[in-house]
Amino acid sequence: MLVFQNKIGKGYVLASTYLCIAVTLLIFLILFWNSYPALSTVGFDLFTMTWNPAKDQFGVLSMLFGTLAVTAIALLIAVPLGILTAIFTSEILPNRYRLYVKSAIELLAGIPSIIYGLIGIALVSPWIATLFELSSGRTLVTAGILLAVMILPTIITLTDDALHNIPQQYRETSKGLGLYPFEIIQKTLVPIAKRNIAGAVLLALGRALGETMAVMLLVGSIDKIPEPFYNLLSPGQTITSKLGREVGESAFGSLHFSALNAIGFLLLLLVITLTIGTQVYMRKGIRTV
Amino acid sequence: METNTARKINAGIEEEAEVSIKISNLNVFFGVNHILKDLSLDFQKNKVNCIIGPSGSGKSTLLRSINRINDGTEKLKVTGAVHFNEKDILNGVTNLTQLRKDIGMVFQSPCVFPKSILENVIFGIQQHKKLTVSEKQDITEETLKAVSLWPEVMDRLKDSGQSLSIGQQQRLCIARTLATAPKVLLMDEPTSSLDPVTTRVIENLMERLKKRYTIVLVTHNIAQAKRISDQVFFMCNGQLIESGTNDMFFNTPKKEQTKSYLKDETCVCR
């Protein structure tokens, strides 16, 4: 009976694993299958500036730039802020308050992105317009700021867990060696938790790259790279905002629909490359310890 | 502390001994619990001062009061005086970083950082002063030799410290503490997680280290205390019941509680 139960358990675990792998492969295959007509027709013209479905022109460079710019802005704001907040909640805030603060932060993660988008339109966008004397506050920076707020809970919660789960003896040993409290955080705890912190940032990066609704409402939705390119207080377009706006308008099976699948495929490749890249970097870091 | 040399009366016999740490009327409270009760005792220089007693008798709390590692713990209150280097380190201005550098601590289970062997050894000392590459090498070699670990790891100093066996890790932790050039070594049951052979290695190490350092060892292992201690302090329920030299304490104990504890490790002082 036990052997039978073991076999069932093993089969269940294996089946779940294979199912996950199959779903991932299926997503890849379907996206690639639907992208193929556009990829074979447009070819390397995909990496140009002009997007005009009426003329079968599907250049994605501006969207790629917008995606990377908005994500970079979000990470630049959220990563330091999130890690410092997590250090505060995990190492400085008394335990009896930590749970309340952490619950409040986790609550932020549950807010639907459309609500963030609405807050962005009502609050952040006018503020940016006034602050920088712009005709419209819907810019790459606005989308980046809002995205930063959206990914903060992920970074804070996971980094806080990573730090809090480090055994107490590392803190005591460091204290016993004469390190100041700040040095214990900087030289003992953060290096020990760096892999998990990187994981938190990676998850946040995934969310930032994939976020559609809030970004679509705030990014300005103009298919161009700002001039000069570092003028990020200009409207732009991200891959997700483009998909969000145009998928409904494109006819199923058309070249336009195929091109939209192609940019989705590109986004997937981007996320996977960044994920694998970060993991390889972290493993390399661990090997050299 | 008025003088480093104090006339000590232990178990009724007078002797001259140089005192390294003098504890006077030490009380430790945690909330409403009175953990250490009016303790007064001296730890002698270049000796293995061994604190024994049953679990919960306050041995570790006493040890942790000496380098003030419990500071910052909520609801903790400490009164009395601990004199070290002719200064009361509990009262008045004390540089805690310097204090913990001078009074190093080795914990129950080895805590090796996820860094290389070399980085582990210099981890503490390089927080106190900037080291050149050759200084790092020299300190590592010297301290690893002091704990007899050098021959085992000299070819793999860049390997992770966590790749060592538990016994080697504990010696690495002792080396890391020695690297900060302490005057006193506090050892909180440093062999409790080790096998008998490795325990003996650490005990031999303590025998050698006491020539250069004052050692305060907490152990619940009576046989170990008998093997390596010079001075023994028996604690029960937060009080110092009896103290004396190894010979006097184990051969002619005065108090009934001590006799009972040495006989079958039962504590009748509660």
Image (cartoon, rainbow, N blue to C red):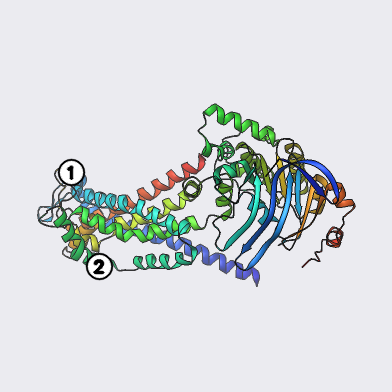
In this view, which residue lies farthest toward the right? B252
Does B256 sit left or right of B99 as displayed?
A: right
Q: Is A61 or A281 nearer to us in this picture? A: A281
In this view, which residue lies farthest toward the bottom? A1
Does B62 sit left or right of A68 as displayed?
A: right
| Residue beneath the point at 30% across and 52% down | A77
Image position of A100 with respect to A140: above or below? below
Q: Secondary structure at mark 2?
A: helix
Image position of B152 with respect to B238: above or below? above
Q: Is B237 or B206 nearer to us in this picture? A: B237
Does B155 sit left or right of A140 as displayed?
A: right
- Distance from label 1 to label 2 (Cα)? 28 Å
Tell me residue B183's x, y (percent): 66, 39
Q: Is A202 or A163 nearer to us in this picture? A: A163
Label 2 sits on residue:
A114
Q: Secondary structure at mark 1?
A: loop
Amino acid under label 1?
A: Phe
State the image quarter where residue B208 is shown: top right
Of mark 1 and mark 2, the one earlier in the sequence is: 2
Does B124 sit left or right of B265 as displayed?
A: left
State the image quarter where residue A85 is shown: bottom left
Amino acid under label 2?
A: Ile
Tell me residue A59's x, y (percent): 17, 49
Can residue A228 be seen here? The reply is: yes
How many C-alpha atoms fall within 10 Å of the one at disc 1: few (<14), some, or many (≥20)?
few
Locate the N terminus of chain A by quadrant.
bottom right
| Residue beneath the point at 61% across and 67% down | A6
State the image quarter where residue B242 is shown: bottom right
Label 1 sits on residue:
A229
